Image (cartoon, coloured by chain):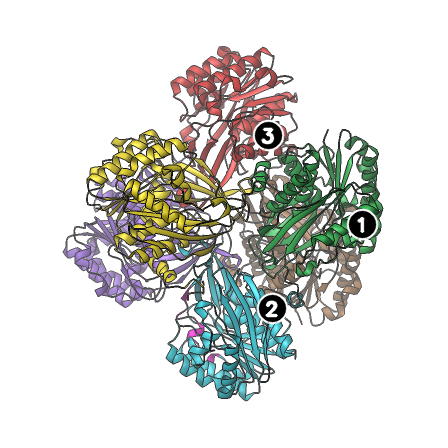
Chain colours: A brown, B purple, C red, D cyan, E green, F yellow
Amino acid sequence: MSTVVTIGEMMMRFMPANNLRFEQAGSFDVYYGGDESIVAVSLARLGIETSYVTKLPKNVFGDIAVNQLRMHGVQTDFITRGGERMGLNFYENGASMRPSKVIYDRAHSAISEAVSTDFDFHRIFSGARWLHVSGITPALSDSMEEVTEDALKTAKAKGLTVSFDLNYRRKLWSQEKARKVITRLMKYVDVCIGNEEDMSITLGFSPAGTDVMKGHLDVEGYKKMFLRLKEQFGFTCIASTLRESRSASDNAWSVIIYDGRDFCVSRKYDIHLVDRGGGGAAFSAGLIYGILKKMSLRDTTEFAGAASALKQTILGDFNLVTREEIEGVLQGDTSGRVQR
Amino acid sequence: MSTVVTIGEMMMRFMPANNLRFEQAGSFDVYYGGDESIVAVSLARLGIETSYVTKLPKNVFGDIAVNQLRMHGVQTDFITRGGERMGLNFYENGASMRPSKVIYDRAHSAISEAVSTDFDFHRIFSGARWLHVSGITPALSDSMEEVTEDALKTAKAKGLTVSFDLNYRRKLWSQEKARKVITRLMKYVDVCIGNEEDMSITLGFSPAGTDVMKGHLDVEGYKKMFLRLKEQFGFTCIASTLRESRSASDNAWSVIIYDGRDFCVSRKYDIHLVDRGGGGAAFSAGLIYGILKKMSLRDTTEFAGAASALKQTILGDFNLVTREEIEGVLQGDTSGRVQR
Amino acid sequence: MSTVVTIGEMMMRFMPANNLRFEQAGSFDVYYGGDESIVAVSLARLGIETSYVTKLPKNVFGDIAVNQLRMHGVQTDFITRGGERMGLNFYENGASMRPSKVIYDRAHSAISEAVSTDFDFHRIFSGARWLHVSGITPALSDSMEEVTEDALKTAKAKGLTVSFDLNYRRKLWSQEKARKVITRLMKYVDVCIGNEEDMSITLGFSPAGTDVMKGHLDVEGYKKMFLRLKEQFGFTCIASTLRESRSASDNAWSVIIYDGRDFCVSRKYDIHLVDRGGGGAAFSAGLIYGILKKMSLRDTTEFAGAASALKQTILGDFNLVTREEIEGVLQGDTSGRVQR
Amino acid sequence: MSTVVTIGEMMMRFMPANNLRFEQAGSFDVYYGGDESIVAVSLARLGIETSYVTKLPKNVFGDIAVNQLRMHGVQTDFITRGGERMGLNFYENGASMRPSKVIYDRAHSAISEAVSTDFDFHRIFSGARWLHVSGITPALSDSMEEVTEDALKTAKAKGLTVSFDLNYRRKLWSQEKARKVITRLMKYVDVCIGNEEDMSITLGFSPAGTDVMKGHLDVEGYKKMFLRLKEQFGFTCIASTLRESRSASDNAWSVIIYDGRDFCVSRKYDIHLVDRGGGGAAFSAGLIYGILKKMSLRDTTEFAGAASALKQTILGDFNLVTREEIEGVLQGDTSGRVQR
Amino acid sequence: MSTVVTIGEMMMRFMPANNLRFEQAGSFDVYYGGDESIVAVSLARLGIETSYVTKLPKNVFGDIAVNQLRMHGVQTDFITRGGERMGLNFYENGASMRPSKVIYDRAHSAISEAVSTDFDFHRIFSGARWLHVSGITPALSDSMEEVTEDALKTAKAKGLTVSFDLNYRRKLWSQEKARKVITRLMKYVDVCIGNEEDMSITLGFSPAGTDVMKGHLDVEGYKKMFLRLKEQFGFTCIASTLRESRSASDNAWSVIIYDGRDFCVSRKYDIHLVDRGGGGAAFSAGLIYGILKKMSLRDTTEFAGAASALKQTILGDFNLVTREEIEGVLQGDTSGRVQR
Amino acid sequence: MSTVVTIGEMMMRFMPANNLRFEQAGSFDVYYGGDESIVAVSLARLGIETSYVTKLPKNVFGDIAVNQLRMHGVQTDFITRGGERMGLNFYENGASMRPSKVIYDRAHSAISEAVSTDFDFHRIFSGARWLHVSGITPALSDSMEEVTEDALKTAKAKGLTVSFDLNYRRKLWSQEKARKVITRLMKYVDVCIGNEEDMSITLGFSPAGTDVMKGHLDVEGYKKMFLRLKEQFGFTCIASTLRESRSASDNAWSVIIYDGRDFCVSRKYDIHLVDRGGGGAAFSAGLIYGILKKMSLRDTTEFAGAASALKQTILGDFNLVTREEIEGVLQGDTSGRVQR
């Protein structure tokens, strides 16, 4: 009986230690993650009953993935077991002008070959209030496109709030197909999340005045875009992360949320990146948490901004923080002074 | 026959490798340290005969602690062995807005349960010129409060210069008790060292215009506070570190010394922190060294400033530098160019 | 049948992991490198047939050195085996104001004791178009001074383009001897490479307005110096790296090339240093590549600048990048955004 | 609603990597464990609903301990939070004639200072069929002696089967006190588990013909002892591990169970030890599993023997095997051939 | 222009450090290998010109695989680039009665999806004397079955000696299909290599008196089987490894070769296993080397036996020994005394 | 004022982690050692005032070497600083039939270039009772041959007992030179230590019936040899280690001492080797300790046997045990049972 349900692919991430390049790495650190599982772990750690739905192979790595979720308190009852393999990715941390690199090896994964009969969404959503899914899930395969639509439709029918993180992955599908599918799915969506690039590719809306490659961000452009998105799709809430990529080592980070009435931009964080992966999903989790807890727009925005900034100081996909730690940052202590 | 004697608790510090959080750490790097032992190691490495006084358990970790001190040339003849356990702490390195964390596990340590009969201060101070102790030592327990006063009184009686680093630790005692005890001990003290927070809590004096949480430092406020402290307690020397905590990754650092006549502020260092622990103790050691070597106030201040800045580029508690390296920085080479 | 030949010493570099100081290091990471081998590896990785000439001991470390070169596609047919030992160095990474340190242990290495009969340069240069050597090679020993001159003379006679990276190493020879020998060798040289310090010590020319210790660089001073160098030695090309050492952690970096007609200064990179070693050699390789590929002066300069900046984000001596990665930076993406 | 409940202390175990001695260890691998938690993890992994009861401090290490249990599927609802600290131990792996060493630092742990009101055993045992506890639990403190008796008494009253692993720890209490307390508690016990040393010290019965120090084991002596134990205490089942300590590197291992009618000795395993810790607890879990699953005495004995032998090939306290793996060994494949 | 050509799949092997189980591994050591690549590396290191033929993806891992081969001197000119992914496997080292485990993730690898037009065997075999392939290669896919037959047929037509290591992999194909295909391919084969299990499954011949599960080996049974195999298939040479799996930690090892006239069994080695993987391929390489070098049957057998025993004392797939080291063992020094 | 003085070379030992071969090692663990320094550390740890005499370079590695000695309580006052470099060696741990390998890189070390005026033996031996040196020390160079003879002669003149461990190193000198020099030095020696190989090469005496390569040891042959050695050189004590090299992984070990009247052979230990280096020096230390403490021949022999066996279960050169641990083994507990 979970409050929130998320559906997606869980992957093993292999990462060379320290700043080593792939070709230097005699060993790889391994982390488990994947967009929706990050959201699930964040919410479970914050005390929200959350269930993660996926399909994992019947081998030790599938077992470990389940155990990783259970460790953080995520409910795993609706994870189907079977299929061929885990999705993998290889992640090389960049530095300064050398970008981080991700090499995906996720084709033929168990979840990508899952079909609608693998999941009984009526049962899964029983008692739930919220469904979250990202644009990666329908991109995994044609059958997963169908599974995703099935999930969204059922959720909608059962009265759940539906949030969708656009998250375009060019290795999974073409821009054309992504736009066609995502646009079609938007009719089920209440809360739409995405960065500039995602919104431009999957929905065809871009914020004027922003040039991601150059690190320029114009908040006014976002606001105008949000208004048009609301008009077009009727979202009750639209949100975006505002990353300024100064280098692979240092980013600035803030977030913006529009609740249909007001816009709110969080404080901006200068982050000396430990691991930027998972920042977006940590933001989604913070946003969902704020809304579920009926926080004000201002509080939700700052909470989600602080949570997602903190994520980027932590290795691996999961946002291994406590609510107390997020609140510490919220209360204005970003001095990094030692806490004894 | 040591020139300087320091008294305190030595702890094992367990630290996750790299930037890992406690819950990610499959292993912990271990460092030995503790405020007064850092001072002792610094001075011994600079060529000052220094004896460290403590109580350590009769087990292999007590042995290792002694060996660590001997390795750096510290005299260990007056270390008492016995008691229950080593004090421990767990140290998680922060990053950006995520603060570093210290979890202490030091209750019931051998030294915290030591009593006055464990130490024969007349013998220990025989031939010594200087005693250094921090506010942590009397905070360890009621019996250690007594031991500390015994040490200070005896040192004073035998004509040693006494330096005291206020170092308030909130996990060890209340602000009320700290202020009462520390204030009482000040009558034995010649050289008083402490940062803004310590001076405010333990002595009740704050530098106007400084807000540590916001990273504002007003040197003029420090000077005024020092004048009042001198008036109140009659110190011959008052000194403070001036840390500007910009984030857990980057700090600015300088130091100020007042010798009863003049104030001197060192150059300011921008430090990309490797390990900020031990900066204060490294400063105390530099200050004591400068005075013992009859350096000018300017030279003492710059020496202690450079030494303590260098500490923060080194992992672990001890300031593993040579005098030549400190002097290299003093002579103005902070360009970090490779030395071949 | 190689296009480029480089001649020099290959060393094992022992480096404490992370930011550890030598005295903290329970283990040392080992990297193979040395100025001319870095050039050779860079060129081979860029697809230029390159042969590296040296002498290595007949033991497993000599074998490993050869294998390291073969791994990157460098031709090793003219490496002579014999002699006493590998040259070694110990490299401690600095941080902030604490400089990196290199302790050399290269005396009596196989190559330093090599003699002219160890190498048949007529055969070695057969079919080659370019010889590159650094000022380290003649500095290794009197016999290697002779070998170097033999190589340069033969190359010149056979019509190869000769590039020379001045690279002064004070532990190997005096400034007086360096200037005498290097100046003498310049008559064989077409392309002269060196930083401010090298040019000043080995050729006696300094760029006005530049103070390396203070991090001041005046490009105009370099240009004037280049004009005088061309006048004096008749070089067809003169080039220099422009490092601004802000600290051991952060440098700015650009490069300048003068092709006898025009000067070109590359864009400037802010580098959060991972390993600054090998930056100069990576620049030489980029310069040679640009000329061999008949790039424009502008393209050559930016290519060599980007390549050598990237090197400093990579651990070890070798510049483990691909041409595509260099071109990615050239095309202006220094935002470090993740490449998926 | 758990089938099995176990009660005890969970500790962090710090272990130098590889074969390093404590004084060589720059870092310690950390494992979570403790006798009853090992039993709980084993049973949960075998599919038995199991609840672990303890008290853990309200800090990150307490959180991690809970997460470690959840990861393996153990129910943690009845874990009380509070108190001062985690119990710790330091474990040095021996080799050949150099014995492994354990240094405990568990005094003042949260569970050792727990009191009866921390646990509501009526609620805890609701729906349960089995309680397992070891002799370590009542040894932790006087209050825990009381808690243990309270638990045993309540369990007995509610009709649970009670198993007790005698497990004498000389650092926790004297032989006299242990015998007095343990003997008193035996009236609540159905299944008594212990090795020769435990039975001798805590119950006063020794198997004739066995000399542990010399590695002699006489199974007949065990049988006679078991008969006398049954007579004295009325146990329905008595069991012992039969370890032959040939060296710190190699042991032989078998187990014996007496079900009140028959004796059964398992096959004997030659084990090249990876980590002998937790072997006894893994045996207890196997025994409980066999009885709960109504296996025959022979099958129970072989299952528990194989499970506990496998544990000793695995680092850390927990027996990280699957039922399928135990069954693989049971079916006679101890050849260690690769399973592809 | 290589003397020997081998064709097969190269994989990345991920292995938890030390004796950790998969679920304990926070990082994986990575090794490159695969049956025929091991043979190629062994032969290249022994000085035989050897070319390895495969298909690798156009990504950094494909590049690294090529570099790994080049490092050891293997010729890589006929490696085709393209396709989807590298084959992977996960390898967990066993201990005592706990078997090692391999989890394959090789479906859809570049080589498994290669087709005949990817390789021009006329050109590849030009100047070659020997082709070696294992039963894994035709098992990869239907198209690779075709490629393998194409290679064997062409090699045979061009007069190369063909060796075939039966190597059955149950995860790749059924016993029925394996027997059908392998039996058909035997008409091209001169030298047939395989262990008891392979010969039984793929050719239908078993050595009487041998029970691998129990570690019984009867050499006479092998001889009789070899005679029948020769009769059936007309092999000029038949060879087998004789592994006695005592446990996952300790094996005995010898080899047997039949040259059509005589049988020769090597000395038997007791091996404390470091990594048993690659033992069979190291044997094949030794056998091919002996024949190419026209060693006597006795010398070939002992050479191949020693080489393959040594492999099992080395981590990873490749047999990183020198000819001198093999000869050291051959000359009877298996005392393991330090060589200074 | 030391009781024992030892003189020799201290080296850094670089060792690949785990079982890796040199060519696989991305990093090397570093240990400090060298024959006489091992003896000094052992004796200092046993409570004997011991001074180690050598020459070390004036760099950080020389400093670390001194610190390593101080850590264990060795007196370092007579260590001269200067010269070119530290001696190094590279140590690869073998396994089964693959032998361990040592590659020395010690030529031109500071101590090898030391001269008699570097050491004032009259002052060094003041108050001492014992001098220990090995055959490595005079082998380092002609000047060190002179220094060694100077030391022995002075020690003898001042009435010290002189022990000499023959320790032949073939990389340092020829058998001819070794025999000539060592034989000449024997006139100063009271206690002669060496294994079969050393005695045969340096003194020309072999124990009948022993074949080291085959692992045969005949104690009677040793006894007869000792009698002849005593006759020839007049030693008061002759001792030998009796290593049976079964493989690089497993050895048997015992020791024999002849005190001029009786022979005593220790119990024999089966050792699963962790690191066999330093076994001989640990034996010498045990022997010296026994004599200094006036133990009986039996007790001395067993003490030295147990101490040197324990050494081989410990990584690195130094015998990091306590007297209590040696006595634990002496009292017959070699079962390796956990000590809690």
Q: Which mark is residue C42?
A: 3
Q: Is mark 3 on a helix, strand or loop?
A: helix
**Residue E320 seen in the figure:** yes
Q: Which of C223 and E138 is in front in this view?
A: E138
Decide: few, some or many residues near mark 2? Use Cα within 10 Å; few <14, some 14-19, many ≥20. Answer: many
Letter of the chain that mark 2 sits on in the rendering: D
Q: Residue B170 carries which label?
A: none
Question: Which amino acid, by three-letter code, is at mark 1?
Answer: Arg
Question: Which amino acid, by three-letter code, is at mark 3?
Answer: Ser
On whether residue C4 falls in the magenta region, the answer is no
Q: Which of E265 and D7 is in front in this view?
A: E265
Letter of the chain that mark 3 sits on in the rendering: C
Dot 1 and dot 3 within a common chain:
no
Residue at (61, 17) in percent of width and height: C123
Q: In which quarter of the image is the N terminus of chain C?
A: top right
Image coordinates of residue F44 in percent, x first then y, are: 30, 50
Letter of the chain that mark 1 sits on in the rendering: E
Q: What element carries label 2?
A: helix
Q: Which of F118 and A185 is in front in this view?
A: F118
- Magenta stretch: give its range: D102-118
Task: Name the residue tied to disc 2.
Answer: D306
- The Cα–Cα distance between marks 1 and 2, rounded to whole angstroms, is 41 Å
Image coordinates of residue C206 in percent, x first then y, are: 43, 19
Task: Name the residue tied to disc 1.
Answer: E228
Decide: few, some or many residues near mark 3? Use Cα within 10 Å; few <14, some 14-19, many ≥20. Answer: many
Quarter where residue F32 is shown: top left
**Residue D144 seen in the figure:** no
From what the image shows, is residue C186 above or below residue E206?
Answer: above
Residue at (32, 36) in percent of width and height: F183
- The Cα–Cα distance between marks 1 and 3, rounded to whole angstroms, is 57 Å
Q: Is mark 1 on a helix, strand or loop?
A: helix
Question: Which amino acid, by three-letter code, is at mark 2?
Answer: Ala
